[in-house]
Image: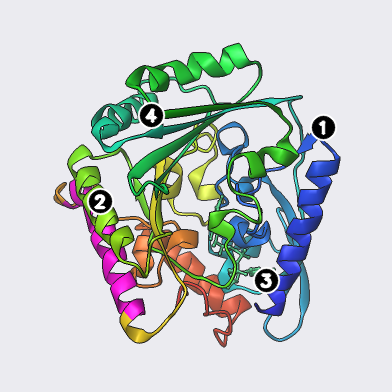
Amino acid sequence: MNSSSRASKQVFGLLFSFAKNSPNITLVTGICECVSAIGPLLGGGHSLLQSQYGFALDNLISVRLVLADGTIVDVSRTRNADLFWALRGAGHNFGVVTSFKVKLYDAPPQYQLYSLLFQQDKLEPLFNLINEIDSPTRARDPKLFINGVLTRIPSGAAVFNYTIIYPGTKAQLEAHAKPFLDIGPSFTKYVPDLNYGNIYVAFGQGKSSGPCMKNTNQGLMGVALPKWDIEGMKKAYTIYQNLTADPRFPYSFILLENYGIVNVKTVDPDSVSLPREERERPILASPVITYRVANDQTKNDASDYSSRIKDALYMAVDASNGKVKRHAYVNYASGLESVPEIYGYEQWKIDKLKKLKKKWDPNNRFRFYNPLV
Ligand SMILES: Cc1cc2nc3c(=O)[nH]c(=O)nc-3n(C[C@H](O)[C@H](O)[C@H](O)COP(=O)(O)OP(=O)(O)OC[C@H]3O[C@@H](n4cnc5c(N)ncnc54)[C@H](O)[C@@H]3O)c2cc1C
């Protein structure tokens, strides 16, 4: 871990304990307890709260940044505004954030949660339902949070584990969960009356959860999609079964995220460097290949499984003859993508970012993480 990420994890620790000990306050952060606050934010910041308040970066007020030459700069809408624009989307390319201010919100008194498991035979109705919920003609409730993962349970079956969270009463959650329950999950768990600070653990994203497992390698290869493609999902499911039957990768999973984009879409896409595609696509998915021993063969095989799952998820996008292009969320990117695939296809944004890069990091010191140049 480098010192910047150590610092950002400390900041997240502070934010998290702040949220835990101040149940009346929330802020837009990622949904996993072992991920920092600023790492995700610099490239977007997908969150339980995004559909209500926009991405984490939409809630950034100011930053203190150390440049490659050691200069400290304050950055906000009114101070070094060009850099503020660049940091919100391509932020890993410009410096080390040592402190930052974000907006806070009043927290609802309680969240209700359903965790549901669906077997393979429910794939089609499940993904048709989620497409329907996120279809552009439907007014999705911005408080509704839906998150899925394809995982292997101890009995050996690969199942879709969906979590539905709503800030309100059980009756309100049930109204949203009913179409999912009607499909016939094989397992249902209801968790009542959570405050914001203890959602992470209830949701299986706490520090001791599978996604936060220590001493493992985790490879992501994210895709952002306009809708689920049933045939592509079927193919991805089969590859996932083979992947997790391989004794090197049994704990791997596929993220299937539909957090909601109601108020992500209301922010002017040109006000930040974040690519437009990130705001417009309601689905974030990624194989997460987990393995302990990282020899060359295992690394190659992990990458091969990831690529095949990614290609399956992109099947309909690739068949669109260029009408829809591949887009990877920078924080889920594998590093094998092209610059436009990560930072967007709008040439003016890429040109502006490269110009700002020359101004603020002329020797291209910050090029470790999905670099622009
Ligand atoms: C289990 C898991 C759950 C996740 N959940 C979410 C989620 O809910 N929402 C979401 O949007 N993403 C999520 N992600 C993806 C996450 O955004 C990226 O993995 C991100 O890189 C994590 O940042 P980090 O600081 O924790 O990691 P690190 O590996 O420590 O940092 C990643 C990169 O961020 C940059 N960085 C970190 N700190 C600083 C700093 N202070 N100043 C400048 N640059 C810095 C550096 O370039 C660094 O290389 C998740 C990832 C995992 C593995």
Circle 1 sits on which residue? 24
Q: Of the numbered discs in the image, which one, if any, rests on residue 186? A: 4
Sequence-wise first label, 4 or 2: 4
Query: Mark 4 and mark 3: span between their CA atoms?
Result: 40 Å
Quarter of the displayed picture in which ligand 1 can be seen: bottom right
Q: Are marks 4 and 2 in contact (CB under 8 Å)?
A: no
Q: Nearer the viewer, residue 229 or 96?
A: 229
Circle 3 sits on which residue? 5
**Which residue is rendered at x = 80% and y = 43% of the image?**
20
Q: Secondary structure at mark 4?
A: loop
Amino acid type at circle 2 is: Ala
Q: Main secondary structure of the magenta part?
A: helix
On-image quarter of the N terminus: bottom right
Q: Is residue 209 left or right of residue 197?
A: left
Residue 97 at x, y = what percent?
A: 72, 68
Residue 354 highlighted magenta (yes or no): no
Q: Secondary structure at mark 3?
A: helix
Q: Secondary structure at mark 2?
A: helix
Amino acid type at circle 4 is: Ser
Circle 2 sits on which residue? 236
